Image (spheres, grey):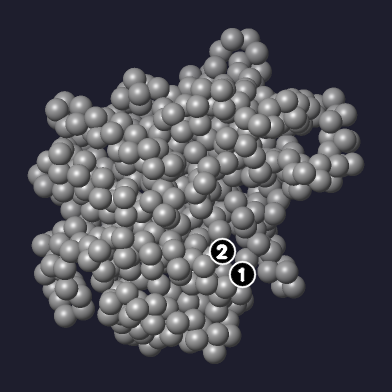
């Protein structure tokens, strides 16, 4: 690999490293996987990305495959930020805000920019990116694009895919393209190009036209879905065509994003937050369903279960003291309103409070910032849960991101608790329950063979349960090296084959993040596991999910 590294360093402006300590640093992300890269590239500009991709393409044409894995801050929970070939680390140099349009609020950025720093800049202009993930302070925009990230406010505003207007993308052969919604006439011009871009448009358009019915099966009856590729969002009935939704959430397996134009929203600093503890899951589900029907929707409907509260209380008894009853069973809901019209916000918060009362539930409503911070401590107990350990056993992101239909939340949670009891493990559930997006990280010692076997037994049973209620395996974290194995079960063999063909259209030599999303089996998912799991690099901010 030294000759490859020397060649790249000669032709790139950015740095190329092969030192053992650099490679070891990039061998892990926030997942349960470890893969040592051969080379680390710090691209300084888009041309560096293009040249690297072109070089690996030329090698692949001669039968030598050197994969490229795009990487932000390494917070990926699925193993999509580790790879055996070239790891391309964007935060070192490609971290700029290129433009902020004062009229539209659109912001143009490079992928390596820290999400939290970008958010702070936007806030000074009265704007924000509402699809921010819980990991915002220590993750990048590139990672959010790769995983179609979402968060607490995705309930009202949607996920990252809903915010992206345009992308600049380096294809597998080094070509640079721009993606946006094309008219029927503009698509016709693209279809006539003699480049790889033209070939991508021709093959993808033919695939979509030939398999309309099958592609519909990729649209599940859930509010969020990050499993596979968003083929159903590419071509609309009016003939317009956009590769952007396909690239978002593809985890670097279809192209390398070098620039993104994102829509922002007006930020309302003054919000109203409601907290309520509910013992009966069926009652909680009914309340959530009615809240979802409001014309002026809450910006978020969040949940933590009683197990999470008990874990946090045991770890730090003073954390929630005097704020909430940590012994009450069931779930705690958090409903927040951020309407820019103060009267509308108060009216809807009052309406929601009455809804809780109608179901015999006492709700606490707060709009004072300092008092709201107390309630936010309760909502943020997942950070305390993720920081726990029992000897070498630690919470692992193996069943972390399921989405179920909102009408099946109670049924699913009861069945999940029964499964955990059967496995003799205590697992907390929390998440963006307004979207049916449930997070869970069971505690295992990944170094023990017995625990490794238990992990994958639980993974199979848990995702079978998710699918049995009409859910999907991921809503905001992606498939990666683990959940990709379940895509044939999520969509069926025929529809999954369309995903395989889509990957082949963009990446015929499999140089873009192979082993992620497509071609994953349970056997491959069990390979390259860490022997020790830790999130030491994230404790400056507290790991969050």
The answer to whether the residue labelled 2 contacts the one labelled 1, judged by CB atoms less than 8 Å apart, is yes
Look at the picture and state if 256 lies above or below 155.
Answer: above
Q: Residue at x 47, y 77 (%)?
A: 337
Q: How far separated are the C-alphas under marks 2 and 1?
A: 9 Å
Q: Which residue is mark 2?
A: 157
**Residue 276 % position (x, y):** 30, 74
Task: Specify whether residue 181 is in view.
Answer: yes
Which is nearer the eye, 168 or 329? Answer: 329
Residue 528 located left or right of residue 316: right
**Residue 245 % position (x, y):** 64, 44
Q: Residue at x 20, y 44 (%)?
A: 418
Query: Which secondary structure lies at badge 2?
Result: helix
Q: Quadrant of residue 50?
A: top right
Q: Quadrant of residue 261?
A: bottom right
Which is nearer the eye, 476 or 216? Answer: 216
Query: Which secondary structure lies at badge 1?
Result: strand
Which is nearer the eye, 263 or 72? Answer: 263
Figure quadrant of the C terminus: bottom left
Q: Which residue is mark 1?
A: 265
Look at the picture and state if 164 lies above or below 276.
Answer: above
Comparing marks 2 and 1, which lies closer to the viewer? Answer: 2
Task: Specify whether residue 45 is in view.
Answer: no
């Amino acid at each position: 690999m030294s000759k490859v590294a020397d060649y790249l360093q000669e032709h790139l402006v950015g740095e190329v490293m092969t030192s053992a300590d650099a490679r070891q640093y990039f061998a892990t992300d926030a997942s349960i996987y470890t893969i040592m890269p051969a080379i680390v590239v710090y691209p300084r500009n888009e041309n560096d990305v293009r040249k690297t991709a072109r070089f690996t393409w030329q090698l692949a044409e001669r039968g030598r495959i050197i994969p490229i894995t795009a990487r932000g801050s390494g917070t990926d929970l699925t193993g999509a930020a580790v790879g055996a070939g070239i790891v391309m680390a964007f935060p070192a140099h490609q971290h700029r805000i290129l433009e902020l349009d004062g009229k539209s609020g659109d912001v143009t950025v490079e992928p390596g920019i820290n999400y939290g720093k970008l958010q702070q800049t936007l806030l000074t202009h009265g704007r924000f990116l509402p699809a921010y993930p819980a990991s915002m302070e220590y993750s990048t925009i590139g990672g959010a694009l790769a995983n179609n990230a979402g968060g607490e406010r995705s309930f009202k505003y949607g996920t990252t895919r809903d915010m992206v207007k345009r992308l600049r993308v380096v294809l597998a052969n080094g070509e640079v393209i721009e993606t946006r919604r094309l008219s029927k006439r503009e698509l016709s011009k693209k279809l006539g190009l003699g480049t790889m871009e033209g070939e991508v448009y021709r093959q993808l358009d033919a695939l979509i036209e030939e398999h309309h019915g099958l592609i519909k099966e990729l649209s599940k009856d859930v509010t969020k879905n990050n499993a596979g590729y968003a083929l159903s969002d590419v071509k609309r009935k009016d003939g317009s065509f956009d590769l952007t939704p396909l690239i978002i959430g593809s985890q670097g397996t279809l192209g390398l994003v070098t620039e993104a134009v994102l829509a922002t929203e007006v930020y309302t600093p003054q919000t109203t937050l409601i907290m309520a503890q509910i013992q009966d899951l069926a009652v909680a589900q009914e309340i959530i369903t009615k809240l979802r029907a409001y014309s002026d929707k809450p910006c978020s409907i969040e949940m933590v279960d009683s197990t999470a509260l008990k874990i946090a209380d045991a770890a730090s008894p003073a954390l929630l003291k005097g704020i909430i009853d940590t012994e009450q069973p069931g779930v705690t809901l958090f409903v927040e309103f951020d309407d820019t019209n103060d009267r509308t916000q108060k009216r809807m918060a009052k309406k929601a409070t009455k809804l809780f009362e109608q179901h015999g539930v006492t709700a606490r409503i707060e709009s004072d910032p300092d008092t709201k911070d107390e309630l936010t401590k309760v909502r943020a107990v997942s950070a305390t849960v993720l920081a726990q350990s029992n000897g070498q056993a630690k919470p692992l992101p193996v069943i972390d991101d399921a989405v179920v239909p909102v009408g099946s939340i109670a049924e699913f949670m009861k069945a999940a608790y029964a499964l955990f009891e059967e496995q003799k493990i205590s697992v907390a559930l929390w998440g963006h329950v307004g979207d049916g997006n449930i997070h869970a990280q069971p505690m295992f010692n990944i170094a023990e063979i017995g625990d490794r076997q238990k992990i994958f037994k639980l993974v199979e049973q848990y995702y079978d349960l998710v699918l049995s209620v009409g859910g999907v395996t991921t809503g905001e974290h992606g498939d990666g090296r683990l959940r990709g194995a379940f895509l044939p079960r999520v969509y069926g063999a025929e529809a999954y084959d369309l995903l395989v063909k889509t990957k082949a259209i963009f990446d015929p030599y499999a140089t873009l993040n192979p082993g992620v999303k497509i071609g994953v089996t349970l056997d491959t998912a069990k390979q390259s596991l860490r022997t020790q799991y830790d999130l030491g690099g994230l404790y400056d901010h507290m790991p969050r999910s």
